[in-house]
Image (spheres, helix red, strand yellow):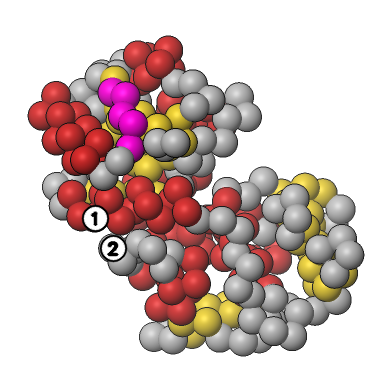
Amino acid sequence: MKRRILIVDDEQDILEILSFNLQSEGYSVDTATSAEEALEKLSPQHALILLDVMMGGISGYHMAEKLRKQGNAVPIIFLTAKDTENDMLTGFSVGGDDYISKPFSLKEVSARVKAVLKRGPSTKAASEPVQQDNTSEKLTIGDIVLDLQTKELAIDGKPVALTKTEFEILALLASSPSRLFSREEIIERLWKDAPYTTERTIDVHITRLRKKMGEHASWISSRTGYGYRFNPV
């Protein structure tokens, strides 16, 4: 059965070229020229949304935020002419799964679509888990509890909302406290099917993750030029 994708962009030429390319790769494609139209067309059959950020009316960010508040977890890849760290932070904070800057290559779009559709919870965490309960699939470090089955984080018994990617990064790092993971290794483990993922993307996700961890933010430390590690103190 063909995977169904909804492309949302107010530029007709972009809709046409993306639609043609993705259909030629075996996807079923629907298009919309505004967020309002997209919200009407979106159905449970859609496996992914390619969503332009800057459109008249409701922006792509607001559409994504609306969907997430409704509990709709359909993967979203933002398409945007903006390429600053703040823009990436905004995209990920409203529930985006990936971010492609315009102008883009069709190969890049194809690779990212495939990666997001294939991406699942990280099951490649390194060995030496800390207090991992193999029955309940929970990883407990101090007052932080990662439920690897429900993909939920709790700190001091209170739930902390993470995006799918944020959870995967935290689960990877926390599985081997004090082990240093290079950005390249994190990309290889979590984005192995997306060759266009950059190290800066990792930095943006880590920034968001640290903010959500509050007073435990320092538990994710970095070494300039090397990478990140989960280092409870």
Rendered residue at 22%/33% (across/down): 19
Rendered residue at 37%/43% (across/down): 77
Magenta stretch mostly in which secondary structure? Answer: strand
Find disc 1 in the rendering and name its residue: 108
The amino acid pointed to by label 1 is Glu
- The reply to whether callout 1 and callout 2 are in contact (CB within 8 Å) is yes
Going by the image, does 204 lie left or right of 158? left
Rendered residue at 18%/49% (across/down): 106
In the image, 156 versus 45, the foreground residue is 45
Magenta residues (range): 27-31
Residue 66 highlighted magenta (yes or no): no
Residue 73 visible? The answer is yes
Q: Position of residue 192 (x, y in %)?
A: 41, 68
Q: Is residue 86 above or below residue 10?
A: below
Find disc 2 in the rendering and name its residue: 196
Rendered residue at 76%/79% (across/down): 129
Q: Secondary structure at mark 2?
A: loop
Q: Quadrant of residue 221?
A: bottom right
The quarter in which the N terminus is drawn is top left
The amino acid pointed to by label 2 is Tyr
